[in-house]
Amino acid sequence: MSTSSVNGLLSPRDVEVGPSNDGSDVVLEDDVSSDPFDIAQAKHVPVASLKRWRQASLVLNASRRFRYTLDLKKEEEKEKRRRMIRAHAQVIRAAVLFKLAGEKQIGTLVPPAPSGDFGIGLEQLASVTRDHNFSALEQYGGVKGLSELLKTNLEKGISGDDTDLSNRRNSFGSNTYPLKKGRSFLNFLWEAWQDLTLIILIVAAIASLALGIKTEGVEEGWYDGASIAFAVFLVIVVTAISDYRQSLQFQNLNKEKRNIQLEAMRGGKAVKISIFDVVVGEIVPLRIGDQVPADGVLVTGHSLAIDESSMTGESKIVRKDHKTPFLMSGCKVADGVGTMMVTGVGINTEWGLLMASISEDNGEETPLQVRLNGVATFIGIVGLAVAFLVLAVLLVRFFTGHTTKEDGSSAFVKGRTSVSDAVDGVIKIVTIAVTIVVVAVPEGLPLAVTLTLAYSMRKMMADKALVRRLSACETMGSATTICSDKTGTLTLNEMTVVEAFIGRKKINPPDDSSQMHSIVISLLSEGIAQNTTGNVFVPKDGEAVEVSGSPTEKAILSWAVKLGMKFDRVRSETTVLHVFPFNSEKKRGGVAVKRINSEVHVHWKGAAEMILASCTKYLDTDGQLQSIDGDEDFFKAAVDEMAARSLRCVAIAYRSCEADEVPTEEESLDKWTLPEEELILLAIVGIKDPCRPGVKDAVKLCRDAGVKVRMVTGDNLQTAKAIALECGILGSDAEANDPNIIEGKVFRALSDKEREKVAQEITVMGRSSPNDKLLLVQALRKGGDVVAVTGDGTNDAPALHEADIGLAMGIQGTEVAKENSDIIILDDNFASVVKVVRWGRSVFANIQKFIQFQLTVNVAALLINVVAAISSGDVPLNAVQLLWVNLIMDTLGALALATEPPTDHLMHRLPVGRKEPLITNIMWRNLIVQALYQVTVLLVLNFKGTSILHLEGERRQHASDVKNTMIFNAFVLSQIFNEFNARKPDEINVFTGVTKNYLFMGIIGITFVLQVSSHLVFH
């Protein structure tokens, strides 16, 4: 027997190593050839490892055992289909372009045909984008002409009222695609009965029924065969119901994953809508990391680059401008900003066709699932050996005349016993042996992981965490460190400008425009209105102004509105020439605008110290230009003082540009690098973002649980330190020194060895870039930590991908960040991250409870039958009774124990190490003591039951029936009490909180009632 299976029970080797120096994961040759049931990593597992553990498993019902694992064959077919659809689309596009080239020469382009309320029909419109038909777009009057045909305002979007939306859906379809139906309950029934052992039992039941009726008549002879058939039917139905419920939970979670929220312009107002609500004609802003929600054309764009690999299969970034304006659904924005007009939705897009042709696959193995397959294989081999031993002993005893009938005579006498009686005797013996295999091979053990994960995932949704990868639930229980963002995760993300400096003067209150010159206000309004991804909507009915955008953008826009900025007027008076989107490396974003008088201004906004370093002058409150020489220390002190009070410091600056510095060609303009030197400082603002309530308690909870919380932020070190002290990440000022707090650039400059050493000490990293976060994750993993990391930006994707658990932010996170994450924190709250840790620990704890329970049943059932078979040639637990025990143990037991909610006790112990054995010493103690107790009681009843129950004077068969019924009831009731014991393996009081777990109490109650009922059925 391979030792690999035993390693599932004992401590597996820790082969999950951190990435190599070049960032790639290396799996050593030694690891590859070792235990097949110890997959090296939770993420990015090689296909060879997945094949190895499947081949090493002992499986009686492959369709059930491997249901929630990755279907390797189907995955290959899916990839082939993807390639085929892509190739088909490209061939059609090439043919259309060839045809159009000919039509253009002879001028035979078809004019748009009106459809319903709109000036163009569905097929004509969809083909424009699908076939990248630039000639047709030009013929329709370009994007402007197409917008008129679709009754769309390119700036304000569609009206968005119910009638308008309904008309658009009726004319052009909705942004949904037909999904392949989930499997019906009948599929699960069919799958459940394809267990080899159950098929043998059904055949045995039919044979037993036929022989019984033949020898004893219908009235007496139907009992044995029918009772086995009924027990098998019950096992199949209960198994199918349990599996079907799990399937429905996964379907709901998949639906939630696909429901992307995005921003669209409706009636001049930016509104949040679901991707499924997008309609043709919609104007959708695009930013870095967004997913293109539907097919469309570019309205405006600056340095816009799209990653089309999801559609073309080629890892190529494509630049988009007015010459190549077509955007494909499902692609990601890699760089720049822009707006698009939707021209095709749902099944009328390539993405819709692709999604409709590919079924949603829940397949994914988790390390615990694979290890439990090893456990199941090991137990199964032992069970098979025991079953064969029992079979051999009973057959030998039967054919040698040692097996007796009810009246004490031999069941088999050579030459006298009829063939039908002999066959009947053999069928009964084979049925018992096969039933022992059913009990001994725990097919439900690996599925118990899926059950507890499905339960945890559903409950985690209520705790604001959407699980994208099953294994993340599990791995989170082992997390030793959490690298958290500051903004929005530790803080409320409700930002307001609370302090402002114009020149050397502190404006108090910060929105008092009377303390500033009109020139300053004009330049600030121009810079803030144009250098933003936010929007200001002024309702016509005089209601309050609505500001949208990121929290930082909203805070600055709200401040400018209070100063008197007229957002729409400022934007109409200036023309944007070029945009440099905010960059997390440079910590700034810029825009070049052309004014009515043809003067060009370049506006910058970003981290105060970064902008200040580029400034040579500043405007004072009187609108006078002053040299910054000699005042640098004043501004630096002002920034440090604001940062020390946990304010985010943002500087706003500008400079004029000579006409000859500005490129005139559009292509040159797209590649133009905005000048960042010799800037004129307009203002420094301090933005307050208070700590989230409860975050300090959550951080303390992590500390108590042995999980170190580290803050990784782009803010300056003083702000980061102040927030870390406020949140309890830093215990005191004494901790706020090197190397506990460090700047990203300092960490980045260290060698690999130094980084690994310093990483263990770091508590706060300020002014960090996404690459610094990646380096920190790699260094911590090399040091043996299990790392959870939060991220929201596109540039965070590598760190989220590299970490053991990537946690993307649901509100602020980009689609690219979410796609690279394992869990999405729906409310961006650190307290929700801690709840995920709690659930992760609960998964491991629940599986351990179930293992303890299942192994105790296995050991007791096998021992009692083996000893009884060898000593007396009969088994006290018959086939029907063993099937009932299997049902209690495999399905109901899993349901009761795998769905225990997490307790506070879980957060008062250290993380579950990756080397942690599945069965701890405490569990071995419980298991051995409980099994010995059960076996002792059952054997005493088996050998002394007749005298204990005073049955000496009764008929032999009646005495045997009463004794075996007593054994059966004692055995089942022992398992019911054992379920209580398994709830709290390491606690004395196993009844704590039991009344709050209604499912557990319900299952115990049902099991007890059914046991009493079964007594009447079986005897």
Image (tube, grey):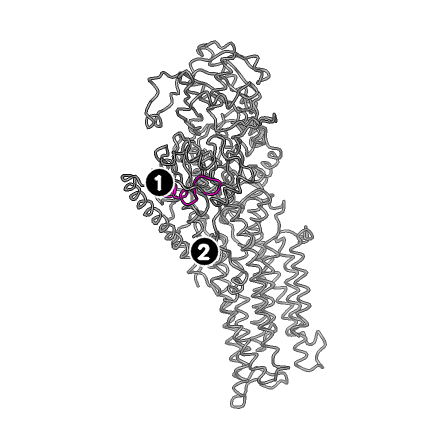
- Label at residue 37: 2
* Dot placed on the residue nearer the N-terminal end, 2 or 1: 2
In what quadrant of the picture does the C terminus appear? Answer: bottom right
From what the image shows, is residue 777 above or below residue 69? above
Q: Residue at x 51, y 80 (%)?
A: 396
- Inspect this view and state whether residue 24 appears: no
Let me know if residue 125 is in the magenta part: yes
**As rendered, which of 168 and 369 lies closer to the eye?**
168
- Label at residue 133: 1
Residue 319 percent location from the top left of the image: 36, 34
Q: Residue at x 53, y 22 (%)?
A: 643
Is residue 16 shown left or right of residue 924?
Answer: left
Secondary structure beneath dot 2 equals: loop
Cα separation between marks 2 and 1? 53 Å
**As rendered, which of 94 and 527 lies closer to the eye?**
94
> Label 2 is placed on what type of residue?
Phe
> Label 1 is placed on what type of residue?
Asn
Residue 507 lies in quadrant? top right
The range drawn in magenta is: 115-134
Residue 9 percent location from the top left of the image: 51, 57
